[in-house]
Amino acid sequence: MAALVAGVAGLAIGWPAWRSYRQREAREQNAERYQTWRGRARPSGASLREGMTGAERRRIGLGAILASIAVACLVIGLSTG
């Protein structure tokens, strides 16, 4: 039961942050392609992409910790059961 709760909590916390990060990356990549198409490309090495925000990094990290706890609970439950 603990594995299920930890797994669902990890998914509920981490997945929205991951989806938000990937959507923002796609928008930024699209904006860069548009700027290149318009002839306003940034110099090589310069990028608009920021990467993950601190909040996204924390939420994804917390989701990963909860997923690890879920796996540990499964292993312990199956080995003692």
Image (cartoon, rainbow, N blue to C red):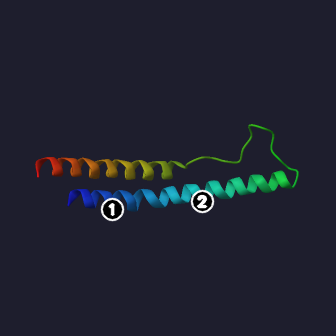
Check residue 28 in the rendering and tell me which mark sits there, or answer none. none
Q: Would you say 11 lies left or right of 22 here?
A: left
Q: Residue furthest left?
A: 81
Identify the residue shown where x is 11% and y is 52%.
81
- The N terminus - image quarter: bottom left
Q: Residue furthest right?
A: 39
Residue at the disc numbered 1: 8
Identify the residue shown where x is 72% and y is 57%.
30
Q: Would you say 52 lies left or right of 66 here?
A: right
Residue 68's x, y, as percent?
31, 47
Residue 46's x, y, as percent?
74, 40
Residue 67's x, y, as percent?
33, 51
Task: Report, in whole angstroms, how far the alpha carbon at label 1 lies from the one at label 2.
Answer: 22 Å
Q: What residue type is labelled 2?
A: Gln
Identify the residue shown where x is 88% and y is 51%.
39
Q: Is mark 1 on a helix, strand or loop?
A: helix
Residue at the disc numbered 2: 23
Q: Would you say 42 lies left or right of 7 here?
A: right
Q: What residue type is labelled 1?
A: Val
Density class for disc 2 (Cα within 10 Å; few <14, some 14-19, many ≥20) is: few
Q: Name the foreground residue: 53 vs 22.
A: 22
Residue 38's x, y, as percent?
87, 55
Q: Residue furthest top?
A: 45
Looking at marks 1 and 2 on the same chain, the residue that comes earlier in the sequence is marked by 1
Q: What element carries label 2?
A: helix
